[in-house]
Image: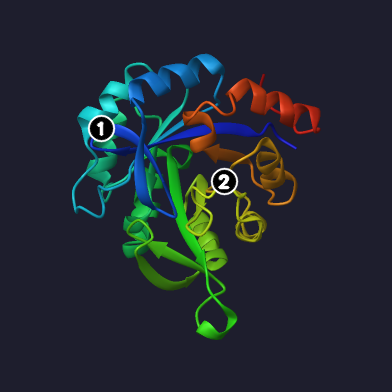
Amino acid sequence: MKEIKIIPCLDIKEGRVVKGVKFVNLRDARDPVEAATTYCKQGADELVFLDIFATVENRKTRLEWVKRVRNVTTIPFAVGGGIASIEDMKALIDLGVDKVSINTAAVKNPRLIAEAAKEFGKERLVVAIDGRKNPPESGLPRLEVVVKSGNEPTGIDIADWAKRVEELGAGEILLTSKDTDGTREGYDLEMTRAVAEAVAIPVTASGGAGTMEHLYQAVATGKASAVLAASIFHFGEISIPQAKKYLQEKGIPVRI
């Protein structure tokens, strides 16, 4: 097993880090520059910055917000939200962003994945996938892709989409369950494992971490290559070193 990455996530609204439950009921968490500085010092493996209302508000990522955080970040830095073209990606990469993450735009225009992989290299391209569970009688896929911050269903099976994303050239997948997001009740292990087993590229589990055991379950049961969390880190309940020490003691390889 390769080293498992621990990744804090900065969900940004109006220039502040926020956190909600199931993509709604957002509350202020902390200043993004202060958060990024702290996570870098604690030894986070990467940092993800998501301008969560960019697509919903039909605008591009706020570059000034990104620049403030990029200036203090000393670890690999990925940015998503409102990225819909090669030009959008280039603007971010020119700011020093290491990876760009596309979600809704990839579903609407899958060719963008191939174009971006060719232009920037697959190692710089993350495809974020948001999913939800549907009841058996719904006539919809059991695990369905949703877009526009979880507000729009697609009718696309999540494992099928993950396979296509990989074929088109994505370097990794950031998978978030809308159903578990912010609940602190654990990742959606069924969804995580379904995607991880469908592809060979790394899959980051996101949505629902509330304890260090949840981080372990995402790897041991969900087969994730990395675990992303927000609330437990933002509100000081668990530190990055504590999470790494716990996983190491459970036999999971991490970078100390």
**Amino acid type of the residue that numbered disc 2 sits on in the rendered structure:** Arg
* Mark in the foreground, 1 or 2: 2
Q: Badge 1, how many Cα within 10 Å: few under 14, some, many 20+?
A: some
* Residue visible at 32% across and 59% down in the picture: 148
Circle on res. 15:
1
Q: Where's residue 161, x and y in %? A: 50, 64
Which quadrant would the N terminus be assigned to in this image?
A: top right
Going by the numbered disc 1, the residue's amino acid type is Gly
Q: Residue at x 51, y 83 (%)?
A: 138
Q: Considering only vertical position in the picture, is 74 above or below 51? A: above
Residue 40 drawn at (x, y percent): 48, 18
Q: Is residue 225 left or right of residue 92?
A: right
Please name the residue that numbered disc 2 is placed on: 184
Q: Quadrant of residue 9?
A: top left
Instruction: Please state the horizontal and vertical placement of residue 119, each as a whole percent of the image.
Output: 34, 42
Q: Which numbered disc flags the more N-terminal residue, 1 or 2?
A: 1
Q: Is residue 50 at all visible to an observer of this figure?
A: no
Picture coordinates of residue 230, whole percent (x, y): 49, 37
What kind of element bears circle 1?
loop
In this picture, residue 55 sits left or right of residue 123: left
Which sits in the foreground, 121 or 37?
37
Q: Quadrant of residue 37?
A: top left
